[in-house]
Image: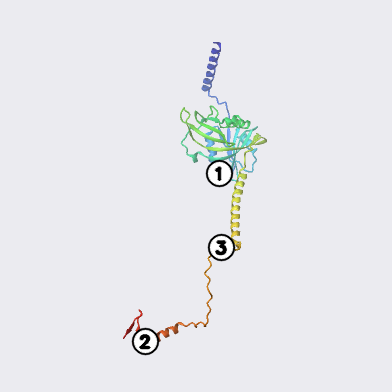
Amino acid sequence: EQDETSEIKREQNATNREKSEDRDGKWTNKERVLVFSSRGISFRTRHLMMDLRTMMPHSKADTKMDRKDKLFVVNEVCEIKNCNKCIFFEAKKKQDLYMWISNVPHGPSAKFLVQNVHTLAELKMTGNCLKGSRPLLSFDPKFDQEPHYALLKELFTQIFSTPRYHPKSQPFVDHVLTFTIADHRIWFRNYQIIEEDASLVEIGPRFVLNLIKIFQGSFGGPTLYENPHFQSPNMHRRMIRQATAARQKERQMVKQILKEKRSEEKEVLERDVTDEVFQTPAEPRDPEVQLQPPEPPRSKKKLRLTELKKKTQMKRKGVERCPYGRKTHY
């Protein structure tokens, strides 16, 4: 009985504390996240950055950082803006996008390659949520199995979770941010909670994070973890070019072989014995011996003249030979 009464008292004390906190509404978690980028980003990256800012009411913006500046300058910018967390988008070669998440100023920090970016304006999903509402964070069970994923989980929770009683936040929970691990990558999705049975509809944005390295300090320092499955985009493009070049080279070799075969002289085969199997010999005949010389060939004109002469003679005599072999008298 004493144990039951003590448990009831504890529950009452806890509920009283929550009620007092709700009445007071103190903003104790002063997390501020600086979201900005370097120069040279594409329009899709800019839209993604704006979507993250609207999704996180505790975020702050800043002007784009020059490419020549080193990454350690970001720590100073965060101190000026009074931010203790940072999301920095770094563009390279106008086609590769890298994302840094860091705990300023002491670290740790992580560098990702951002792939398959789809923004809110691009997706046009049916889901919707209140601007400034607090999200639920859903993590894959694999985040608790390995230490580097556990570190990333803590970083994500501190950056993406909206602090309670933040002045710009709304006291509602109507969407979920999911972090799923698949194919050695982290897949980010944003879903709306429609009803109490936890039916979800996607809102956006969506992107995939490919982990490169985890550093001990903020934007640098000793490397805590390096992803062995990571392949740089330069290497990936080089392998694609080599594969296409190998296919082209193979086609050229096939063409050359066909050309050489056509140009080669055909070999003369020896006489086959079976060729004369179906040839029957003719009957033997005695050779004819000509005793008189052959008559000289007459020309066509002479033949015609002789025929005309014969016809005229026959007319004079009054007898003309019928074409059917009969004689007719005139």
In percent of width and height, residue 84 lies at 61, 32
Q: Which residue appears at 62% of the width and 44% of the height?
A: 235
Mark before the other along the chain sequence, 3 or 2: 3
User: In the drawing, does residue 79 fall left or right of residue 308?
Assistant: right
| Picture quadrant of residue 287 | bottom right
Q: Residues within 10 Å of mark 2 (few under 14, many from 20)?
A: few
The image's mark for residue 92 is none
Which quarter of the image is occupied by the C terminus? bottom left
Viewer-proximal residue among 218 and 66: 218
User: Which residue, as the protein is rendered here, is positioned at the far left?
Assistant: 330
User: Which residue, as the protein is rendered here, is positioned at the far top?
Assistant: 1
CA gap between label 2 and label 1 equals 114 Å
Which residue is tagged 2?
A: 314
Which residue is tagged 1?
A: 42
Dot 1 falls on a residue whose secondary structure is loop
Mark before the other along the chain sequence, 2 or 1: 1
Dot 3 falls on a residue whose secondary structure is helix
In percent of width and height, residue 83 lies at 60, 33
Viewer-proximal residue among 3 and 297: 297
Name the amino acid type tagged 3.
Asp
| Picture quadrant of residue 76 | top right
Mark before the other along the chain sequence, 3 or 1: 1
CA gap between label 3 and label 1 equals 78 Å
